[in-house]
Image (cartoon, helix red, strand yellow):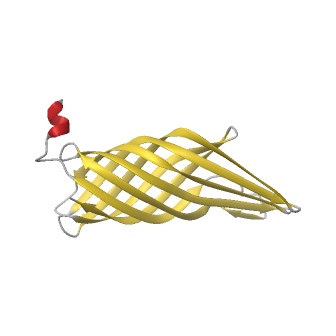
Amino acid sequence: AAALFCNGAMAAGYVGGNVGQGHMNVGCSGAETCHEDGTSYKFVGGYGFTENLYGELGYINFGKAKAVDQGLSVGFRSQGVLAAVNYQFNMGESWLGNVRLGAISLKTKSWAAADGLSGTISETNLKAYFGLGFGYSITKELKVVGEADFSRAEIVGEEASLRSLSLGVQYHF
């Protein structure tokens, strides 16, 4: 077991950042205005325990959703800190794939405004986190990645599915 965590010859770290499109399924399709898509972004750092298995810590913002109907404006935002296991595998000479599974401490904030009145609530919950991705190695250290990240937001007992589709870069050291 100690060899899994102390094998310096195979261990490697990385840092990365992504930006893309987030989607929060808040079910506002019947509203006058319904925007469930917004800009998402993610920052991660990882450490390789073996050639294929990494531990990953990061921050992800799934973006905003907003609905307006009959003078009532409601908005949502979900973001959080994640911890995951990342299994990376080769898909050819310069291509790689990955599957990530973990947990996220997800803070969901909601705000509403109507007739000059407004209010805000927020709630933080521990949720499951899942991700898939691919990458292309430009050099041994620099990779361009495309990733899909998924979780579920919860506020006052209601849940919404979250998705981020993003592109980014990773630097491996």
The quadrant holding residue 37 is: bottom right
The answer to whether residue 27 of the structure is visible from this angle is no
The answer to whether residue 121 of the structure is visible from this angle is yes
Vertical placement of 26 versus 70: above or below? above
Along the line of sight, the residue nearer the viewer: 60 or 129? 60
Along the line of sight, the residue nearer the viewer: 92 or 44? 44
Pick the quarter of the image with the C terminus: bottom left
Which residue lies at the image location 55% right of the left edge and 51% below the top edge? 162
Q: Where is residue 148 in the image (x, y as percent from the top left)?
A: 43, 56
Q: Where is residue 149 in the image (x, y as percent from the top left)?
A: 45, 52
Pick the quarter of the image with the N terminus: top left
Which residue lies at the image location 47% right of the left edge and 62% below the top edge? 41
Q: Quick one: which residue is furthest to the top in this view?
A: 1
Which residue lies at the image location 58% right of the left edge and 64% below the top edge? 38
Q: Quick one: which residue is furthest to the bottom in this view?
A: 138
168 sits to left or right of 71: left
Which residue lies at the image location 38% right of the left edge and 52% below the top edge? 132
Q: Position of residue 160 (x, y in %)?
A: 62, 47
Q: Quick one: which residue is furthest to the right in this view?
A: 115
